[in-house]
Image: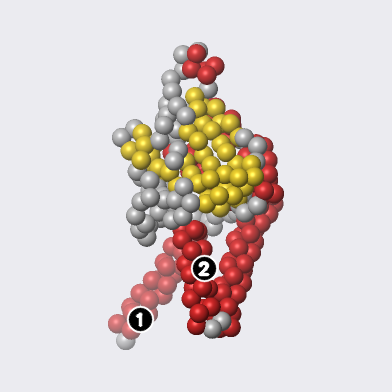
Amino acid sequence: MENKVVIRITIISFIVGLMIAVQYNTIQKPESRDTRDIWEIRQELSEEKKVHSELLNEIVSLKKIAAEYEDANIEEQGKVLQSTVDNLKKRAGLTKVVGPGVHLNIRPAEELILSGYKVEPISPDLLIRLVNEIYRYNGLYIEIDGQRIVHTTAIRDINGKTTVNSVPISNSNVDIYIITENFEQAEKLHSYLYASTFQDDFYLDNLKLTIHPAKEEITIDAYDGDLTNTYLLKSEGD
């Protein structure tokens, strides 16, 4: 009888102790609150809706290709298949592309260099930010200092030098070429980059970012490396 009383007291004490511990932990570690303002939330929502729209467009495109396969005869199916392969190779960066776009140039700010400031390599993190923003504003294809940006591209610091596809880029004169879907998108991308803080960001690193007006025709060469299944862009330490 006494053993049962002891067991019951022990169980009750354990439950009470557990409840106190949970309550104490809740007080000590309250749930983190979302401190973003309404505009930050709206911007994130807008980006998510944009991704959703792109996925829907991709689904429509794939359904269209499937319908073409079903409606075509053997000979036409071969043409549709070849067209699909060519399009995938283009999107993967395996072919040269020509189209409307924007030309950027990065070089040391002469007035700062004349004042004694040192020329530093272009920051990989800043370059990654620029590339991601270009893609976010409808840039389709990008080339940096002769290196085509593909899904396996790594932009990072190797032995103190900024590299793209493991190839060191110039410290003194880097051209970036961007191709968009149409000239209207190229003009919008130019306007966005011109109004952004990127020119100031590069200037803080003693560099001058020149954003040339949109062009009707820009050429970007094919990627000449081996494609592997890795991450899109990463900096050292990722």
Residue count near mark 1 (Cα–Cα under 10 Å), binned few <14, some 14–19, many ≥20? few
Q: Residue 100, how many percent across, how many down?
A: 62, 47
Residue 237 lies left or right of residue 69; in this view the side is left
Quadrant the N terminus occupies: bottom left
With respect to residue 18, does 167 lie above or below? above
Q: Amino acid at mark 2?
A: Ser
Q: Residue at x 40, y 35 (%)?
A: 169
Q: Residue furthest front?
A: 75
Q: Amino acid at mark 1?
A: Val
Q: Residue 181, how many percent across, how many down?
A: 62, 54
Q: Residue 176, how many percent across, how many down?
A: 51, 39
Q: Residue at x 60, y 45 (%)?
A: 217
Q: Residue at x 46, y 47 (%)?
A: 221
Residue in front for this viewpoint, 70 or 141:
70
Q: Which mark is residue 5?
A: 1
Q: Residue furthest top?
A: 115
With respect to residue 87, does 164 lie above or below? above
Q: Which mark is residue 83?
A: 2
Residue in front for this viewpoint, 40 or 179:
179
Q: Residue 92, how many percent across, how many down?
A: 46, 58
SS for callout 1 = helix
With respect to residue 192, does 67 lie above or below? below
